[in-house]
Amino acid sequence: MSKVTPQQVQMARDCYDDCLAELDRGLGRMLERLESRGLARTTWIVVTSDHGEAFGEHGRFGHGNSLHQQVTHVPLLIIPPLEDAPGTPSVINTPVSLRDLPATIMDLVGVDSETAFPGSSLRQLWDSSASTKPLSPVLTEIVDREKSDPSSWKTGASVISDGLTYLRSVDGVESLYDLLADPRETNNLSSLSQHQEQLARLRALVKSYVPANPDDPRQIEDDDVDDD
C-alpha cells in the first residue's frame, strides 16, 4: 500500500465532516417537522451510530480493523418528549453499550422488555425512580475473516471498565489505557507493573465473553499474549 500523504488524510477528514454536516441538517429537518406536526411533545428521539472512523490514528484508516476509541466511541443522544423534557440537558459520562439500547427504548415507551431483548435499560443512569439492573459490559469485538477456513478466523475484543480500556487485537496483542487521563489512547500501560492486576482482571473479563477464535471455545492462554 502506498504511503498516505497528510493532504490526503485532511481531504478524507473534510469529506467525512461534510457527511456529518449533512446528517446534522437532516436531523434538524426531522426535528422541525416533528414539532410542526405537534409530535415533538410526545416523541422520544434516539440518535446514535454503529461506528466511527479512523484517520491514521494507531496506523489505521476507516473502520472494521480497529478497537480504538476513534472507531468504538460513538454518540448517543436520548431526547425526551418536550412535555417531559427537563429544563437543562444533562451529560452522562458513564460509558455504556449499545446492546442495552433496545431494552432502554422499550422501557421508555412503557413496554416490558424482559423477554424481548437482552440487556438492561439505561434509564437508571438519569432517573432515580427507575429499576436498577446490571448494565451490559462495554464490550466490542472484531473478527479477522480474511481466510476462507472459519476455524482460522481470529477475534479481537476490547472492554471498558472503571475508567480503563483493555484491547486484545486479532493477533493477540494487548494494550491498556487510562481513558480519563489519555482519551486518545496514546500511552499503553499494559507493560507497567502497577497495572498488572487491572490488566489481568480485564483480560479475564474479555476472555469470558470473546474467545480468540469464534469457532473454538478454547480461550487463548496468558502466555500467548504479547505486549506492544
Image (spheres, rainbow, N blue to C red):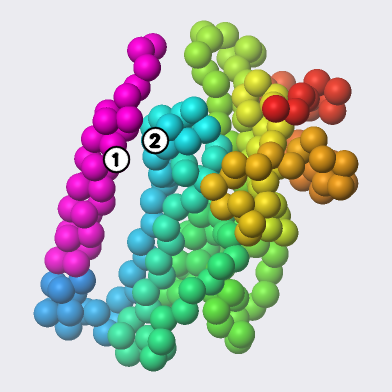
Work out how far the residue at label 2 is from the one at label 1, CA to CA, in angstroms.
7 Å
Q: Are marks 2 and 1 in contact (CB under 8 Å)?
A: yes
> In the image, what residue type sits under mark 2?
Phe
Residue indicated by mark 1: 13
Number of numbered discs:
2
In terms of image quadrants, where is residue 180? bottom right
Q: Which of 67 and 59 is in front in this view?
A: 59
Spot occupied by residue 38 in the image (x, y as percentages of width and height) = 17, 83
The main secondary structure of the magenta stretch is helix
Of helix, strand and loop, which one carries label 2?
Answer: strand
Dot placed on the residue nearer the N-terminal end, 2 or 1:
1
Q: Is residue 25 magenta?
A: yes
Q: Is residue 8 above or below residue 29?
A: above
Q: In this view, does 203 lie above or below 132?
A: above
Residue 68 lies left or right of residue 8; in this view the side is right
Residue indicated by mark 2: 55
> In the image, what residue type sits under mark 1?
Arg
